[in-house]
Amino acid sequence: MSYHKTLPEDEVRRINQQQISEWFGKFLNDKTPKKKQVDTQSLDYYDILEVSPKASIEVIERAYRVLAKKYHPDTAPENVSHSEAEEKMKKLNEAYEVLSNPILRTKYDHQRRRSSSRL
């Protein structure tokens, strides 16, 4: 004999929806570190990684690896100076950090759409 109360599906859905909202609310509140704040004015991360805005995380990761290998300061081509390669790697790292994180990517896309609609 079971002592657990069986809840109707609607009740389970209502309880779970509230818990999911609370859980995501922790992450969606503006608690991202200042370094992680997305600045759409200066850079377009999709252009930096040379991918489409509809690209999957796997495509973004692959593009990052290819470009990181190409522009790494130790393996950069002769026609690229060491300081230029370092700057390119910083931009690549920042773009990858935002686009590989689903929450930061959603915020970035939202800001990007909002800024493009103002133009």
Image (cartoon, rainbow, N blue to C red):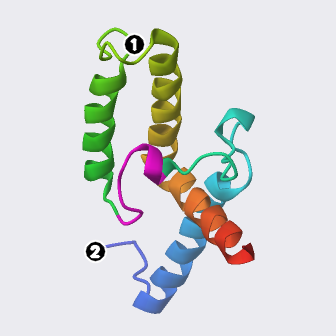
Mark 1 crowdedness (10 Å alpha carbons): few <14, some 14-19, many ≥20: some
| Residue on which disc 2 sits | 1
The amino acid on which the numbered mark 2 sits, given as a three-letter code, is Met
Query: Which SS type dominates the magenta stretch?
Result: loop
> Could you say which is closer to the camera, residue 78 or residue 91?
78
Asked if 96 appears above or below 116 in the picture, the reply is above
| Residue on which disc 1 sits | 73
* Residue 6 falls in image quadrant: bottom left
Q: Magenta segment, which residues?
A: 46-54
* Residue 72 falls in image quadrant: top left
> Could you say which is closer to the camera, residue 21 or residue 85?
85
Residue 49: x %, y % from top left: 39, 44
In the picture, which quadrant includes the N terminus?
bottom left
Residue 100: x %, y % from top left: 42, 46
> Which residue is pictured at 72% across the width and 73% down the height?
119
> Which residue is pictured at 47% across the width and 82% down the height?
13
Residue 53: x %, y % from top left: 42, 63
Say if the magenta span includes residue 55: no
> Which residue is pictured at 36% across the width and 61% down the height?
52
Left or right for 112, reference 3: right
